[in-house]
């Protein structure tokens, strides 16, 4: 999928894995996470930070399970939005703030990672829209997100990895519940195009 910014958006597959691996670098985006934070219990995640998390995500991709969407500027991956059915994300079950709202099946947007020189240029909103379309094309009817809402000033990038609330609003999401002052749960009804 290509949008009006000239970026191309593609799901993470074995074909796009090398570009994803390059984007995440030797640190696995942040502290050896490799986008496994929400997929594992806290103890399992901490035990396998780094290469073990990378291998675990590679196995998920190799098995054809949904993981997320990459933004490409020409042949280089410059952004990432993780999205998957919520039932694939074990850690949400233990979160007091982000616990399940109801029995509706949802796909969860749970991480953004954007190359430094591409930040603050609207890429996260376009990634969110591409991820939502990807979920819909895979049968999702509802997409849910867990962004942070900034009250004053600028939130350091490291704390905005689940996205910013204003980005979700611009992408057509609505707040459905808030159990923390700065962490709304937002949803968008989607349909297959």
Image (spheres, rainbow, N blue to C red):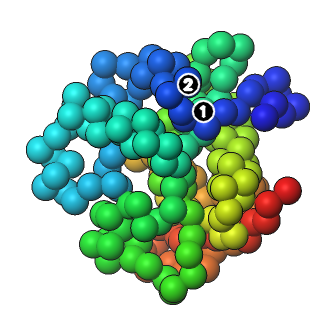
Front-lying residue, 110 or 181:
110
Q: Which residue: 55% across, 25% down?
A: 16
Please identify the quadrant where the N terminus is shown: top right
The crowd level at tag 2 (other Cα within 10 Å; few <14, some 14-19, many 20+) is some
Report how many numbered discs are placed on residues in the image.
Answer: 2
Q: Is residue 58 left or right of residue 82?
A: left
Q: Distance between the residues labelled 2 and 1?
A: 8 Å
Residue furthest out toward the front: 63
Question: Which residue corresponds to the image point at 31% horizontal and 19% vertical from the top-left?
Answer: 26
Residue 32: give x, y in percent of width and height.
Answer: 26, 33
- Name the spot of residue 142 as percent of width and height, x first: 66, 70
Q: Residue 157 in the image: state x and y as whole percent.
A: 46, 38
In this orientation, which residue lies closer to the viewer: 59 or 116? 59
Task: Give the residue number, with chain letter if any, for mark 2.
Answer: 16
Q: Establish if 124 lies above or below 55.
A: below
Instruction: Please report the residue visible at 16 percent of the width from the left and 40 percent of the height from the top.
Output: 48
The single residue placed furthest to the top in the displayed view is: 75
Mark drawn on residue 141: none
The answer to whether residue 114 of the structure is visible from this angle is no
Instruction: Quickly name the residue at label 1.
Output: 70
Say which of marks 2 and 1 sits in front: 2
Q: 157 above or below 144? A: above
Helix, strand or loop at mark 1: strand
Relative horizontal placement of residue 148, taking residue 24 as reference (left or right): right
* Secondary structure state at the residue bearing disc 2: loop
Residue at 75% x, 26% y is 7
User: Farthest bottom residue?
Assistant: 102
Q: In this view, does 173 lie to the left or right of 118?
A: right
Q: Where is residue 190 in the image (x, y as percent from the top left)?
A: 75, 66
Say if mark 2 contacts mark 1, CB within 8 Å.
Answer: yes
Q: Earlier in the sequence, mark 2 or mark 1?
A: 2
């Amino acid at each position: 999928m290509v949008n009006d910014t000239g970026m191309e958006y593609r799901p993470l597959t074995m074909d796009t894995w090398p570009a994803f691996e390059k984007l995440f670098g030797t640190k696995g985006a942040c502290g050896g996470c490799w986008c496994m934070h929400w997929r594992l219990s806290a103890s399992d995640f901490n035990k396998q930070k780094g290469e073990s998390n990378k291998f675990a995500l590679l196995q998920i991709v190799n098995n054809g399970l949904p993981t997320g969407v990459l933004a490409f500027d020409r042949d280089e991956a410059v952004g990432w939005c993780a999205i998957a059915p919520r039932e694939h994300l074990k850690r949400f079950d233990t979160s007091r703030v982000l616990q399940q709202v109801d029995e509706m099946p949802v796909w969860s947007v749970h991480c953004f990672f954007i190359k430094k020189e591409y930040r603050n240029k609207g890429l996260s909103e376009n990634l969110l829209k591409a991820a939502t379309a990807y979920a819909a094309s895979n049968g999702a009817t509802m997409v849910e997100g867990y962004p942070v809402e900034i009250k004053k000033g600028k939130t350091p990038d490291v704390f905005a990895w689940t996205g910013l609330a204003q980005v979700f609003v611009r992408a057509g999401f609505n707040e459905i519940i808030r159990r923390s002052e700065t962490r709304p749960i937002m949803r968008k009804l989607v349909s297959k195009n």
